Image: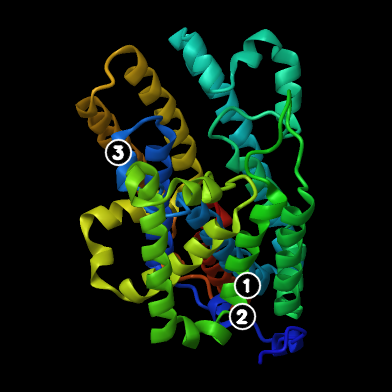
Amino acid sequence: MHDRTHTSKRLIGEAPPEFRSTGRDPRIDVCRGIALWWIFLDHVPNNVGSWLTLRNYGFCDAAEIFMFISGVTCALAYGRARQRDGWRGVIGRSLRRGWDIYAAFLLLALACAVLVYVAGSDHLADDSNTRVFFERPGAALAHAAILQFRPVNTDVLPVFVICHVLFAPLLWLLLRAPNVTLGLSLLLYALVHFFGWRVPAWPDGVWFFNPLAWQFLVVLGAWYVIEGKTIRDWITSRPALVLSTLFLALSLFLALGQQIKPLVPQALTDLLFPLDKSNLSPLRLLHFLALAIVASWLVPEGWRGLSTPMLRGARWCGENSLPIYCLGVLLALVSQFDLFNISNWPAMQIALSLGGVLMMTAVAALLNALSTKRKPAVGAVDRKMPAAVTNPKVEDRARRTVLDAQLRAVTAPSTYCP
């Protein structure tokens, strides 16, 4: 049995091979991009397009995917930053990224309020939780600034603010005692369910995504990058695949029972549903883990399908997750307004769903193109080095400047982290 108090040999100075690599697994961004599409489709109420997402076929939805992958990408980005800049660099980058997400959250909250005001819809003001903006604007802004007030569908961003701000000490713990750190995270998750710990919101209620519970998926993702090799043989084994497939089949049967009433006894449906999404219900967690195991079998590393046009678009969205998530929230509001005031026919729902996904992909492609233009080309230092420069120190400094810029382009949290 693996020792939970195990301290990695990396304590002596060796980093995980993932931290030393400058490449990135395209599956990460593809999965995150698909999750962003699904989140947008699920955010539009009564949308026929949501039948293309996970929500109706099991216990979990795209939120679990997004959280887990965020832990993976943060561990990769900040771990590589540590290799290059040390712990001071990790702390600086994580605080800057936390600030970026915090600023994006405030701007998104204001944008939602402006959009509702322009629409002039009381129905949309109630559904988007922005009415209080117009009734008590000063108090709403003050509580939004301390993450206590959030318009609908912006709830996940405050959780990411906390995760990034605290990621440097988390990474420090994971590199020294990975299994103990994961165990403590699991213990906190269990205590949340046992004692019912919640984080209060304003003007009433609690945080929809309880950070005390959802932190476990972020920690699990980061742990998998650092110590996951210890369980990869089991994950890729046939018993794991069989058990995961059976659990997914059972969850599909039970989930469809909500839509097809005679399929599942009503007493069992009432016992299981609705699942507690705010606190990451254990069934949701197990469903995600089973899904991840099956996905690792179906989409192995280097799978050729990742280069198809559709998945290339998903990858672009995943590489620009923060702006694309914010865009998806606004598109969901616009779609909700159109469905309520223009037409709620399935054809309209399909058109808005397809249009929203295409717009998200187009914006992501534009952002990717702009980002690519700013990246220095490999070997640029050799092409641009004046022939008259012969001082070895000057040459070395110039090469290091370009190489540092290239490394930042690969490891920047702005592209890796949500």
Picture coordinates of residue 306, whole percent (x, y): 28, 65
Q: Name the residue tied to disc 2.
A: 227
Residue 150, image quadrant:
top right
State which tag comes first along the sequence, 3 or 1. Answer: 3
Nearer the observer: mark 3 or 1; the answer is 3
Q: Please give the name of the residue rendered at 57% of the width and 46% of the height, measured from the top-left corner.
A: 277
Describe the element under mark 3 as helix, strand or loop. Answer: helix
Q: Compare residues 203 and 229 and report the one nearer the observer.
A: 203
- Amino acid type of the residue tagged 1 in the rendering: Trp
Mark sitting on residue 49: 3
Q: Circles 1 and 2: CB distance less than 8 Å?
A: yes
Q: Please give the name of the residue rendered at 53% of the width and 44% of the height, measured from the top-left corner.
A: 274
Mark sitting on residue 223: 1
| Distance (Cα) linking label 1 and label 2 | 6 Å
State which tag comes first along the sequence, 2 or 3. Answer: 3
Q: Can residue 36 be seen from the camera position used here?
A: yes
Picture coordinates of residue 49, whole percent (x, y): 30, 38
Q: Can residue 391 be seen from the camera position used here?
A: no
Q: Is 7 drawn above or below residue 324 in the view shown?
A: below
Q: Circles 3 and 1: CB distance less than 8 Å?
A: no
Few, some or many residues within 10 Å of mark 3 (<14, 14–19, 20+): many
What colouring style does the render use?
rainbow
Q: Please give the name of the residue rendered at 63% of the width and 72% of the height, measured from the top-left corner.
A: 223
